[in-house]
């Protein structure tokens, strides 16, 4: 099959030399992508302290997954430059958002915005599409430095459509342009137009995609990112409950759930406009994206807790956003600066974990802050990378000896 020849030349799959499968997942959330940008910049700085200034997140994670704005970040971290290194370092994410978000989400008069939303999406998406195409160029999925996974949703088939490096290596029809998928996973209903494109399958037949934001199905793609792929599958234990094989970092973009802004009495009086736009937010979109993100967190918390390896799963999320900071598209200078402060503040907060009885995130006592947890994760990731490098060198020496 032709797809089997589409191997990643930028970064060999080293998972088969390791002890663990490493996963990074980034939620969707529009301009709130500034929050995971802050978290990931800190993590990468700690990896650089351990392994040198050239260390990048893509060097440490077997899979980097992202939805919507998280998909854009994941692509920035995994797409190769001309030297086969990541296009962006994690520290570049915040400046990127500060520069481009006001043009992606231009602030307009509220009444004019409501009128526009009655007959079409809130934004035309032209700037975002041109920006993404400029970043990604002609790069395709099989070229990513590490395994990239991005969920979308096909409104024609009414099914989730997940794109990944692994699938791209197997199926030419899935080896799509990175730009097409970044645009697709960012095409949030109400906010941006849906996106259509076509590819060719291995027989030369047209294959069409009619896509919208992956947050409809999986705003938190951490669970999807743990699917066995290629060499990673060889590491899976015979006992499926041995989640000690995984190191999973899942980074959210924040929610305003603790504010309890909505209730049934108010919502009972809402019509179309209120469901689409209320106090600077879109309650309809918030409901399904927050719900499916929490279900993924609950599922993973249950799996890791039952298996006795809860320390290997870290979910960083803040449910206490308020005011304009909770908006998906409030891209004013003041709001974005506030999001940077929130991201830095999250690092100092105690780690939180899903309470399996109440299904609510609660602060965990005596386990330190998110910053301390990320430092611990950085050490685990560095140790895993060094182990793989050591074993690869040993195999090379052994192979040369046989020759």
Image (tube, helix red, strand yellow):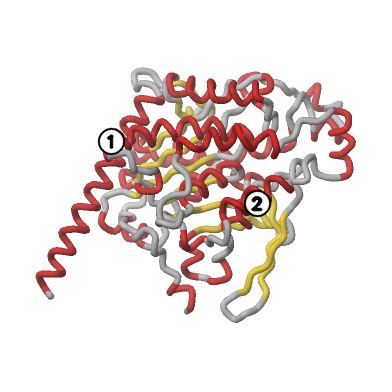
Asked whether the beta carbons under mark 1 and mark 2 sit within 8 Å of each other, the answer is no
Quadrant of the rendered image containing residue 383: top left
Residue 134 seen in this snapshot: yes
Q: Residues within 10 Å of mark 1 (few under 14, many from 20)?
A: some
- Work out whether residue 400 or residue 24 is closer to the camera in this orientation and state it: 400
Query: Mark 1 or mark 2: which comes first in sequence?
Result: 2
Work out whether residue 155 or residue 184 is closer to the camera in this orientation and state it: 184
Instruction: Work out how far the residue at label 1 is from the one at label 2, CA to CA, in angstroms.
Output: 34 Å
Residue highlighted by disc 1: 379
Q: Position of residue 367 (x, y in %)?
A: 34, 22
Location of residue 274 in the rendering, given as x and y in whole percent from the top left corner: 83, 30
**Which mark's residue is nearer the viewer, 1 or 2?**
2
Q: 266 or 152: nearer the eye?
A: 152
Badge 2 density bin: few <14, some 14–19, many ≥20, Cα 10 Å:
many
Q: Which residue is mark 2?
A: 183
- The residue depicted at 88 percent of the width and 29 percent of the height is 111
- Residue 301 location in percent, x, y? 44, 36
Q: Secondary structure at mark 1?
A: helix
Q: Residue at x 31, y 57 (%)?
A: 14
């Amino acid at each position: 099959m032709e797809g089997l020849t589409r191997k990643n030349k930028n970064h060999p799959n080293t998972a088969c030399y390791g002890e663990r499968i490493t996963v990074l997942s980034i939620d969707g959330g529009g301009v709130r992508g500034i929050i995971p940008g802050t978290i990931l910049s800190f993590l990468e700085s700690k990896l650089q302290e351990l392994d040198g200034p050239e260390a990048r997140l893509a060097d440490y994670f077997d899979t980097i997954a992202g939805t919507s704005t998280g998909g854009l970040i994941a692509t920035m971290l995994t797409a190769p430059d001309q030297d086969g290194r990541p296009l962006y370092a994690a520290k570049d994410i915040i400046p990127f958002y500060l520069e481009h978000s006001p043009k992606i989400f231009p602030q307009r008069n509220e009444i004019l915005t409501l009128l526009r939303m009655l007959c079409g999406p809130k934004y035309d998406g032209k700037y975002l599409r041109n920006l993404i195409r400029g970043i990604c160029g002609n790069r395709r999925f099989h070229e990513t430095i590490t395994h990239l996974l991005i969920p979308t949703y096909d409104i024609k088939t009414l099914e989730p459509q997940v794109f990944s490096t692994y699938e791209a290596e197997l199926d030419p029809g899935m080896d799509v342009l990175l730009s097409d998928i970044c645009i697709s996973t960012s095409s949030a209903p109400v906010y941006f137009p849906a996106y259509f494109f076509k590819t060719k399958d291995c027989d030369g037949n047209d294959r069409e995609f009619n896509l919208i934001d992956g947050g409809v199905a999986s705003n938190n793609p951490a669970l999807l990112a743990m699917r066995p792929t290629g060499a990673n599958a060889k590491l899976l234990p015979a006992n499926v409950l041995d989640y000690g094989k995984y190191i999973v970092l899942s980074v959210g973009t924040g929610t305003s759930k603790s504010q309890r802004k909505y209730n049934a009495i108010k919502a009972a009086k809402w019509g179309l406009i209120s469901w689409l736009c209320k106090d600077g937010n879109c309650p309809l979109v918030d409901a399904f994206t927050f719900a499916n993100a929490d279900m993924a967190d609950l599922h993973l918390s249950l799996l890791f807790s039952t298996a006795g390896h809860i320390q290997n799963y870290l979910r960083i999320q803040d449910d206490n956003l308020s005011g304009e900071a909770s908006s998906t598209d409030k891209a004013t200078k003041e709001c974005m600066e506030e999001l940077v402060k929130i991201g830095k503040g999250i690092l100092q907060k105690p780690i939180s974990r899903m309470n399996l009885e109440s299904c609510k995130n609660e602060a965990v006592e005596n386990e330190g802050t998110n910053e301390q947890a990320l430092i611990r994760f950085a050490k685990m990731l560095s140790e895993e990378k060094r182990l793989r490098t050591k074993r690869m060198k040993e195999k090379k020496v052994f192979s040369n000896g046989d020759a």
